[in-house]
Image: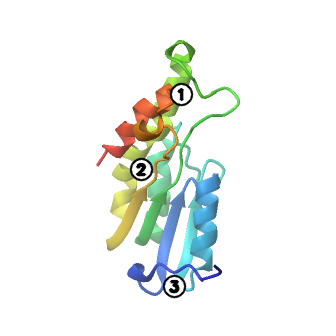
Amino acid sequence: MNRTFKMNSLGDGYRALVIGASGALGTAFCELLNEDPRCSAVRELGRNSVPGLDLEKPDSIPRAAAELAEEAPYQLILNAAGLLHRDDIKPEKSYSAIEADALQAIFQVNTLGPALVLRHFLPLLDPRGAMAVLSAKVGSIGDNRFGWLVCLSRLQGSVEHVD
């Protein structure tokens, strides 16, 4: 199916902000939004953007929001940032594999980071706009029937209850 993606509910000329734009989900959303003829601009934020936003560096969140305040309002703000694993953090398959540093990093990115994004970026949202914080099914309590991704499954519920 090769239909054109359109966010009809946001109206013509809407502006979008994607946080975590360099990740797989963020990149895919940016591509779809850039293809939407109703979208007039897509602002992409991530660790290497200008301004930079790194959820492991909480001070970068209010700094980025302050720098984008002049561009506001956005009709769509999407937080697609998240951390499952990287070179120094491996998905744990049992409680004996939990490492404090890994747990802190995962919690910072997947729970505290989204809460701070809400705090600092909601003021940049158009009153009729929409803001979404994505969380992955991988590691969710309902998807963790095999008992792996112990840390992520515990934190998944945390981000889903930040409101």
User: Tag 1, which secondary structure?
Assistant: loop
User: Tag 2, which secondary structure?
Assistant: helix
Outermost residue toward the front in this view: 145
Q: What residue is disc 3 on?
A: 38
Q: Which color scheme does this rendered protein use? A: rainbow
Residue 33 at what x, y percent from top left? 57, 73
Asked if 18 appears above or below 90 in the picture, the reply is below
Q: Nearer the viewer, residue 15 or 96?
A: 96
| Residue 151 relative to residue 122: left or right | right
Q: What residue is disc 2 on?
A: 117
Q: Residues within 10 Å of mark 2 (few under 14, many from 20)?
A: many
* Three-letter code for the amino acid on which mark 2 is drawn: Val
Is residue 141 visible from the viewing direction of this image? yes
| Residue 159 relative to residue 110: left or right | left
Q: Quarter of the image holding residue 35?
A: bottom right
* Three-letter code for the amino acid on which mark 3 is drawn: Arg
Q: Quadrant of the N terminus?
A: bottom right
Give the mark, 1 or 2, whose residue is nearer the N terminus.
Answer: 2
User: Tag 3, which secondary structure?
Assistant: loop
Is residue 112 visible from the viewing direction of this image? no
Q: Residues within 10 Å of mark 1 (few under 14, many from 20)?
A: some
Q: What residue is disc 1 on?
A: 148
- Residue at the image position 59 percent from the left and 83 percent from the top: 4
Residue 134 at what x, y percent from top left? 46, 53
Asked if 93 appears above or below 14 in the picture, the reply is above
Question: How far apart in space, not on screen, are marks 1 and 2 (Cα)?
Answer: 28 Å
- Residue at the image position 62 percent from the left and 47 percent from the top: 47
Q: Nearer the viewer, residue 135 or 148?
A: 148
Between marks 1 and 3 in the image, the one whose residue lies nearer the viewer: 1
Asked if 74 appears above or below 2 in the picture, the reply is above
